Amino acid sequence: MIFMTVVFLGLLVVSGCGTKDNVKPIAEKVASIYHEPNPQIVRIVETRTECDGKPMYIVFIKGNFRKGNLKASYISFSMLANGEKVWCLKGFNKDQPNRNVIVWEDDDVEIK
């Protein structure tokens, strides 16, 4: 019983190591598209894609983002955990504590 517990805990530690390593550099690249040099990561939600169950994150970043004449204080986006793809980008502002006003939406962007 103790051996199984140790093995299980070891698997949890190994499987959780470094899983969010790609988030910060991708968040910085996304922010740079919208002219923000120093984004703050506010929240990361771990989940899986609907169609094929690949690991992914929904990321929320804070900063001073601009798209043309539009301005937003937050951006949310989805990304594959391996960093290969980013989609569903939304610039938004908080109107009230529990209400967001979407300023713009982009289906996907090319991250270089």
Image (cartoon, helix red, strand yellow):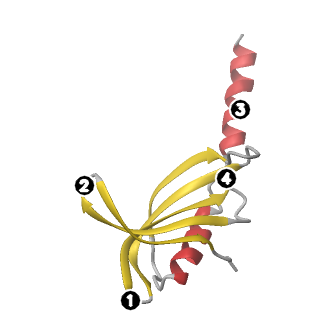
Rendering quarter of residue 39: bottom left
Q: Amino acid at mark 4?
A: Gly
According to the picture, the residue beneath numbered tag 1 turns out to be 69
Residue at x-position 73% and y-position 43%? 53
Q: Are marks 4 and 2 in contact (CB under 8 Å)?
A: no
Structural distance between the alpha carbons of marks 2 and 3: 40 Å
Structural distance between the alpha carbons of marks 4 and 3: 14 Å
Residue at x-position 73% and y-position 59%? 82
According to the picture, the residue beneath numbered tag 3 turns out to be 10
Does residue 66 appear to the left or right of 6 in the view shown? left
Residue at x-position 68% and y-position 45%? 50
Q: Are marks 4 and 3 in contact (CB under 8 Å)?
A: no
Give whichever of discs 1 and 2 has the lower sequence position: 1
Give whichever of discs 4 and 2 has the lower sequence position: 4
Residue 97 circle label:
2
Structural distance between the alpha carbons of marks 1 and 3: 51 Å
Give whichever of discs 4 and 3 has the lower sequence position: 3
Given residues 74 and 108, the one toward you in this image is 108
Q: Amino acid at mark 3?
A: Gly
Tell which tag, 1 or 2, sits nearer the viewer. Answer: 1
